[in-house]
Structures are given as C-alpha cells and as structure tokens.
Amino acid sequence: MYENRRLGLAYISPYIIGLLVFTAFPFLSSLIISFTDYDLINPPEYIGLDNYRYMLDDDTFYKSMGVTFAYVFLTIPLKLAFALFIAFVLNFKLRGIKFFRTAYYIPSILGSSVAIAVLWRAIFSLDGLLNSFLGIFGVEPISWLGEPVFAMFSVTLLRVWQFGSAMVIFLAALQSVPQSQYEAAMIDGASKWQMFTKITVPLITPVIFFNFIMQTTQAFQEFTAPYVITGGGPAKSTYLFSLYIYETAFKYFDLGYGSALAWVLFVAVAIFTAISFKSSKYWVFYSGDKGGK
Amino acid sequence: MTKLFIDKSTTGVVDNDRFLRVQMRKQKIGAVIRYFILLFCGLVMLYPLFWMFSASFKPNHEIFSSLSLWPNEFSLDGFINGWNTGTEYTFGRFFLNTFYYVVPKVILTVISSVIVAYGFARFDIPFKKFWFVTLVATILLPTSVLLIPQYLMFREMGMLDSYMPLYLPMAFATQGFFVFMLIQFLRGLPTDMEEAAMIDGCNSFQLLWYIVVPMLKPAIISVALFQFMWSVNDFLGPLIYISSVEKYPIALALKLSIDVTEGTQWNEILAMASIAIVPSIVVFLIAQNYFVEGITSGGVKG
C-alpha cells in the first residue's frame, strides 16, 4: 500500500534480525556441528561424516525413527477423523453448540502441559484410574505403561484427546459450505452420507490439508508426553525422535551426534511435507479456479 | 382414466403427510442420537479432568479405590503437602517463576509481531516474497534442528539458567504463525481509514498506533492468549535452560515432584497439577471467543 520501501524494511527488520540470528544461523550451525565431535568441555573436533556413518549402525536410531513415524501415522488419522466427526455432528444447528465447542476445546488448551501428562500417568499406571474402572467389570489390571503396544496407545491417546483445535477449524469450514449445495443435492435425492462424501468433504479439502500439515509438523516434534508419561519406554517403544535428540545432546552431551540426528529428522520431515504438498494437487480442491493453485 | 388419476393423487397426499411425519420423527431421533454422541464423548473426554480435581481433595488411599467424583473423605492434605513441595520452596514460588518469563514473552511477542505484520501487510518491501516464504517455512520447521546451536549461543552469552533464552527471541517476531495470523487479519481490514489519516498528515507509525492497533485488537488478544497458553505449558524450553530449582517454573516443578515421589503421593501431585492448569482454564473460559476466532481466521496450531 505504501510506496516507501525503506520504511517497510524498517518495520520488518526485527523479523529479519530474528530470522538470521535465531533461525538461519542456528539452522546452518547445527549442520556444521553435526560434522564434529563435541561434548561441551573439549573444543569441537571435525570428524566429517562419522556421525552419519555411526547412525547407519545405530539400532536406537532405527527404533526411534520407526516409533516416531508409527506415532504420527497413528495419531493424525485418528485425531483428524475424530475432529471431523464431532464437527460434523456439531454442525447440525444444535442448541448448545457453543457449550459443546468449549467442552471439546479445553483438552487442546491444556493437553501439551506437564500437568496433563502427569494426569495421564495417574490414569494409565498399574494401580491407576483406567484399571480401577476395568476392575469393575472383573478385568485383571493391565500394565498400560509397561507393555510396548499399550504404552504407545496411551501416549497416542493423549494427542488424539486434543482434537479440539482441529475440530474448531473444521467446524468453521463446515459452516461456510453454502446451504444451496445441500438443497440441490437433496432435490436430486442424495442421502446424508452421499452429501457428506460428495459435497462436504471435497469442499473442505483445503482445510483438511491445512489441519493435516499443522498436526503432522507438531506430532513429529512431540516431546513432553512421552518424556513425562513413559520416559520413552518400555523397551524404547515410545522413544520418539525428539526424546532421542534431547537425551543425546543434553543428557549424554554428545552435541555432534545430537545435531546429526536433528538434521536427519529435519530432512525426514521436509521430505514428508514435500510429498504432502505434491499429493495435495490430486485431492485438495480450491473453489474458484479448478485444478489446483 | 380420470378416476385412476384422482386415486393416485389422493394416496399421494396421504403418502406425503406420512412422509412428513416420518421425516420429522427421523429428525427428532437424529437430534437425540447427536446429543447422545456429543454428551457421551464430552463426558469421556472431560471425566479425567474432573477426576483430577476431585482426586486432589481425596486422601491418598481413596484416589484409585473409587471412581466417584465426590470424595468420601474430604481432605486438604494433597494441597497442603503438595504446596510445600519436597524442596525448600513452596509451589507458589514455582508459580511466580512461571510468570516471570511468560509475561515478558507475551508482551514481546505481541509488540514485535504487530510491527512486523504491519510491515508485511502494508508496505512494499524489497524481496518481500522471499521474506514471506521464509516466514511460512519457519512455521513448518521442526524446532529441534535449532535447539542445540541456540543452546550454545545462549551459553556463549552467559544466559544459561536464566529466563532470557525463553523470551528474548520473541522480541524478534520469531514465531512465524503469530505474524502470519496478524497479516491475514490485516489483509482483511479496509485501508480507507488509514488513507484518510495519511492525507491528514499522519506518519506511518501514527497510523499503526492510532488506527491499525485498535482495529487489530481482537487479533492481538488472540495472539496474546495463544502465546500465554503455550508458554505456560512449555516444558522443553525450561528443561534445557533452567537448571537451579529456585528458578523452576510449574512444568519443571511438577516433573520434579513426580520423579521424587515415584508416583506414590498421587493426591499431592494431582492437587498441584490441578492448580497448574487453573490459570489456563480461567483465561480460556473468559476469552474463549478470541481463541475460536484466532484459530479459525489465521489458522494456528493448538
């Protein structure tokens, strides 16, 4: 709007400084550090690709990477499906919609806190809430946090529990679908399910895509829940990649290897995001101009 | 022919009437099912939270032995012992510590993000497209790739074990999604007020302060609220930078207490966890519309 380019630059200069100092510089530094052996005490020593070579034989690396992808592929579909389902139900012009929206949103406000992770431990521990509940039906106590499969399930559930923010976005999208579309379909005798799959879903694919991208980038970085609830165990079954990076760098003070791990995670996430964006051409429909962009 | 025609039409009317009644009954049943689903899911979701609050008032032996939300034996031991913590500090201290960095973090985020968003939305800037792409890219960048060098930087600057590393970067609009959200909001605002003020001789900073900021108020409140929530909940940041117990925020204090008691004094832990989430719940209930607007207009993670 305003022509003065220097003035504009002045206004965004805090961002540019921040970008250079707190993002770009650390981003490139971590790549450089990943070629070194550095323990904070002795000066960093250049070791070339040794960290990456070591990674190829590192069982924990494979395990942790696998666990992270499993976690992402478990949580995201569940979370998005649930968010969309509840938003769909809420969209029926029900009375009390605001009340329900609030109730469902609260977990996503609190979900990433240590307090809730602590609560999760109280629920899923051996003598915890869930087992006392199941005990009513005569179910023997299950070691939710002691069995690899169950532990993963418990940690996953915490993130699915936080579906509220995605739901609120879905709800707003559903409310913006023009009513005339449904009326036209009704005249043609379409069922509710057909209307949902043939009208609603295609029209909100941009929002589904948005939620998908935001949720996956977060899920790849999950730290608090597994760290507090399971500590990554049992048998590293919930040892998500950010736990591995954190422990390598800040518990064992192997900053070189930690940086190498972080860079591999970055590349993995970047590839995943790139594939998602590429694939969006085929399933995300933007109204107005058909066929993407 | 005519007879047949009339017959058909009368039955048609009856059918139509029945059809309507069936439709209405179907709708009623549908509404009941929907309320049932919503109530059931809502209860399952919120039950743990209610249970946590009630468990804080139960004596330790009762917590897992009954699922009731109402304590049989009412006890404040959880709060009293929990508040005193196993350390030489009270939980109040950890509570205050949290706000020592959350407050500056929120203020710096708002100021820097508004200024930068104003620049992006209203000015022609050299390489604007490039800067904007970097803004979106930082939203998607996994922060763990920055963690180690940032730690080393703050170590060089002698800022370890202080709150500075937690809020200093916020002075430079480093959280891209807040800037992005404000830009989106600003783009939707009409510029004629600003143009009129410019003709009247306002400079760009006066425009920002007297016209843009008041119009941006709802978005600014959203930014402040989201930043408040995320900062209060943040765990990894304090875990890396804060090492002395006297400076612990709530998040670290809770982790400490569960480690120390090995999860045996559940009433204490759950009482403190309950207190820990009270500020977030209160803020959310007061300002929930700003959350919903913020999340839907700018598209923010949550």
Image (tube, coloured by chain):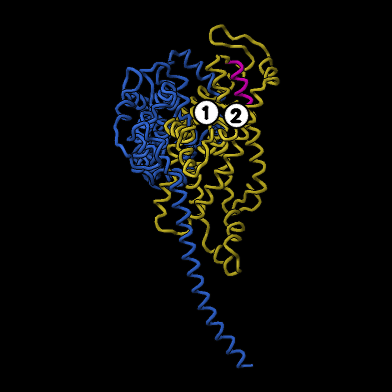
Chain letter of mark 1 equals: A
Dividing the image into 4 quarters, which one contains the N terminus of chain B?
Answer: bottom right
Q: Which residue is under mark 2? A: A237
The percent coordinates of residue A243 (x first, y second) are 55, 25
Residue A25 is drawn in which quadrant? top right
Task: State whether residue B236 is above or below residue A103.
Answer: above
Q: Which chain does yellow denote in the image?
A: A
- Mark closer to the chain start, 1 or 2: 1
Q: Between marks 1 and 2, how big is the CA–CA gap?
A: 9 Å
Bounds of the magenta segment: A255-266
**How many neighbours does mark 1 have within 10 angstroms: few (below 14), some (14-19), or many (20 or more)?**
many
- Within-10-Å neighbours for mark 2: few <14, some 14–19, many 20+: many
Residue B126 visible (yes or no): no
Using the rendered image, report if marks 1 and 2 lie on a common chain.
Answer: yes
Labelled pair 1, 2 in contact (Cβ < 8 Å): yes
Instruction: Tell me the residue at 44%/41% (across/down).
Output: A107
Question: B159 and B176: which one is in front?
Answer: B159
